[in-house]
Structures are given as structure tokens and as C-alpha cells.
Image: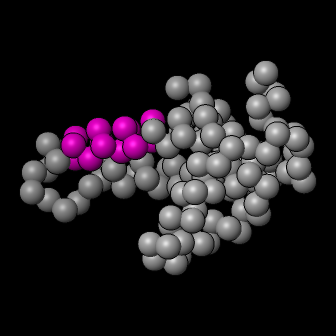
Amino acid sequence: MNWYVAVLKKYTDFNSRAGRAEFWMFTLISIIISLVLYFIDQRIMPGSSIQVLYTLYSLAVLVPSLAVSVRRLHDTGRSGWWFLINAIPILGQLVYLVFLLQDSQPAANQYGSSPKMATA
């Protein structure tokens, strides 16, 4: 949960780096919260296509999600603009996933020092 809260606190930071653990733990917790809210919405209004809680949560974490994604790309030595590769159906999303799965650059890069060194 610490990773999740840390990402929310740095929601405006598009300039530094985020390690794999920070990114994937935030993503995992966010998916779990989204699923819980989706099922709560289904229980409140069964059969409705309106998902109030789920939609509000998705909007609330939109900017932090973008920020941690950009920081994760920075950690692999790439510009945050590579996020736009997701606009290419299937192939772009696969390439983006490979970028996110790659290990951090061990040394400092133009975006700052390695998050691995900060936790070691």
C-alpha cells in the first residue's frame, strides 16, 4: 500500500523515475480497487451501464497513473512521449508493455538517479 500512496503523493511529478515495483504495485492495487468499485456499482444498480463509483475512481487516478507511467519510461531511459505508442493498436501496446517490463537503467540518467539505488 505504501507504493500506492507514494504514487498518489507524486501525482504531478512527470520528471523523475519510478522503478518496476512502484509502477506495478500501484497498477495492481488500482486494478483491485477498480474491480471492487465495479462490483459495488453492479450491486447498487444491477443491469445498469452507469458505473458511478468506478468512473469517479478512474478519473481520480488518471493523472497519477499517467505520471507513474511517464516516470517508469524515464527509468528505462526513454522519453515520456513513448506513452503515445499506445495509440497504435495491438503492436504499440505490446511494445509499451515490453518497455514497462524492462529493468531500470542502473546508473543515473537524464531523469535522475536510479530508484534502486535510493532503496538499497
User: Looking at the picture, how far across and down is residue 116, in whole percent?
Assistant: 76, 31
Residue 1 sits inside the magenta stretch: no
Along the viewing direction, whichever of 14 and 53 lies nearer the viewer: 14
Q: Residue furthest left?
A: 47
Label count reads 0
- Magenta: main secondary structure: helix
User: Looking at the picture, how far across and down is residue 45, in whole percent?
Assistant: 13, 50
Question: Residue placed at 10% from the left, 51% from the top?
Answer: 46
> Compared with residue 47, is residue 53 higher up or lower down, i.e. above or below?
above
Query: Is residue 26 left or right of 34 when viewed as pictured?
Result: right
Please tell me in which quadrant of the rendered image residue 119 appears.
top right
Question: Residue placed at 50% from the left, 43% from the top?
Answer: 27
Q: Residue furthest top?
A: 120
Can you see residue 36?
Answer: yes
Query: Is residue 37 left or right of 99 when viewed as pictured?
Result: left
Please tell me in which quadrant of the rendered image residue 23 appears.
top right
User: Looking at the picture, how far across and down is residue 120, in whole percent?
Assistant: 79, 21
User: Looking at the picture, how far across and down is residue 39, in whole percent?
Assistant: 21, 43
Render colour scheme: one colour
The residue segment tinted magenta is: 29-41
